[in-house]
């Protein structure tokens, strides 16, 4: 007999405005408890120092969270010049202090060098894993692990402010880009060192900024619903975005209800209109365009399922 899972079987995505001072997982657990959700996961960690957009996936949406990990991000960052820290942000210990002799033209030229595709070596204070452990766990023990550089793309970077040895910027970057590392590298290019004092993620993929909610707002809604003797889910669930918003940027392939039966059982099907081989697609069914999963186009031009929604009996 299958064990009954604790919580409500809800599906969808919520955009949480993560507060500073707590981890992304702490944020996830707090929100999961407020929603009393059976299953939840986040889509890429923010540093405890950072605030801003943290999409959380509930239920079936967790199957597609990887696609948000792979999406572009937008940030606003404030860097302090003249001090370098071991974590490249103000949560770390200052390891070097240098005089700041930087002109705006010099700063703008250095910032400009980050635009486009470059190689970046991730910080030791990152959540990347080595032999099953996160790098920051090694760093806290004073152990340095060799890291390979990887390609990142800075689509845009705008200098917003430069005064009192502070630099404020907005950046639009590809997946896997560490803003702390960009700031540390910028400080070294300027010859004075730098570290992050403020970091806010303002965008993930094309999710609307105005749909973000804070943990405090969610808790207040829960408390009010309980006080009014209203089922909390009827209030909270209205904040959820549909499951397929996690893959909203993928091209759509629409299939018939008959074909959908085969797809949901893991079998490839022919589709009337399909993109080129290897393309990742969002699969919908019929006139209502109900989302049922994500697939790829194989060498024969067939639509092959990759991750599919569970049916009601499986949830």
Image (tube, rainbow, N blue to C red):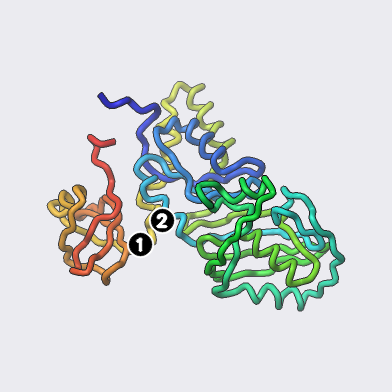
Report the disc number at residue 250. Answer: 1
Residue drawn at (42%, 33%) of the image: 37
89 w.r.t. 191: above or below: above
Query: Which secondary structure, mark 1?
Result: loop
Q: CA distance from mark 1 to mark 2?
A: 9 Å
Query: Which secondary structure, mark 2?
Result: helix
Residue drawn at (40%, 28%) of the image: 7
Residue drawn at (31%, 67%) of the image: 279
Q: Residues within 10 Å of mark 1 (few under 14, many from 20)?
A: some
Asked if the residue at tag 2 contacts the one at tag 1, i.e. Cβ–Cβ closer than 8 Å, the answer is yes
Q: Is residue 148 left or right of residue 84?
A: left
98 w.r.t. 219: above or below: below
Instruction: Measuring from the top left, give residue 223's x and y in whole percent.
Output: 53, 26
Q: Is residue 293 left or right of residue 236?
A: left
Instruction: Measuring from the top left, give residue 200's x and y in whole percent.
Output: 63, 54
Instruction: Measuring from the top left, give residue 241's x and y in whole percent.
Output: 41, 47
Quadrant in the rendering for residue 148: bottom right
Quadrant in the rendering for residue 123: bottom right
Of 117 and 209, nearer the camera is 117
Residue corresponding to mark 2: 67
Q: Residues within 10 Å of mark 2 (few under 14, many from 20)?
A: some
Report the disc number at residue 201. Answer: none
Query: Which mark is in front, 1 or 2?
Result: 2
């Amino acid at each position: 007999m299958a064990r009954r899972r604790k919580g409500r079987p809800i599906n969808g995505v919520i955009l949480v405005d993560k507060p500073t001072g707590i981890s992304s997982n702490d944020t996830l657990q707090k929100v999961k408890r407020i929603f009393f959700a059976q299953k939840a996961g986040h889509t890429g960690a923010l540093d405890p120092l950072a605030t801003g957009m943290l999409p959380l996936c509930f239920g079936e949406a967790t199957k597609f969270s990887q696609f948000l990990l792979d999406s572009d991000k937008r940030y606003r960052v404030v860097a302090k010049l003249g001090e370098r820290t071991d974590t490249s942000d103000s949560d770390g210990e200052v390891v070097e202090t240098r005089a700041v002799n930087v002109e705006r033209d010099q700063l703008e030229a250095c910032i400009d060098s980050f635009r486009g595709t470059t190689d970046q070596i991730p910080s030791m204070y990152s959540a990347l894993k080595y032999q099953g452990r996160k790098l920051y766990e090694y760093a806290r023990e004073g152990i340095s692990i060799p890291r390979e550089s990887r390609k990142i793309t800075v689509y845009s970077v705008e200098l917003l402010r430069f005064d009192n040895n502070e630099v404020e910027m907005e950046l639009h970057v590809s997946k896997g880009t560490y803003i702390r590392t960009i700031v540390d590298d910028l400080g070294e290019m300027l010859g004075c060192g730098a570290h992050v004092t403020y970091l806010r993620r303002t965008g993930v993929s094309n999710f609307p900024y105005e749909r973000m909610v804070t943990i405090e707002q969610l808790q207040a809604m829960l408390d009010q619903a309980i006080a009014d003797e209203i089922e909390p889910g009827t209030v909270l669930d209205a904040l959820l975005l549909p499951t397929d918003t996690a893959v909203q940027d993928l091209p759509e392939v629409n299939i018939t209800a008959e074909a959908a039966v085969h797809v949901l059982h893991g079998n490839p099907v022919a589709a009337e209109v399909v993109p080129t081989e290897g393309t990742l697609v969002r699969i919908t069914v019929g006139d209502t365009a109900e989302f049922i999963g994500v697939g790829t186009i194989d060498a024969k031009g067939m639509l092959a399922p990759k991750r599919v929604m569970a049916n009601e009996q499986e949830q």
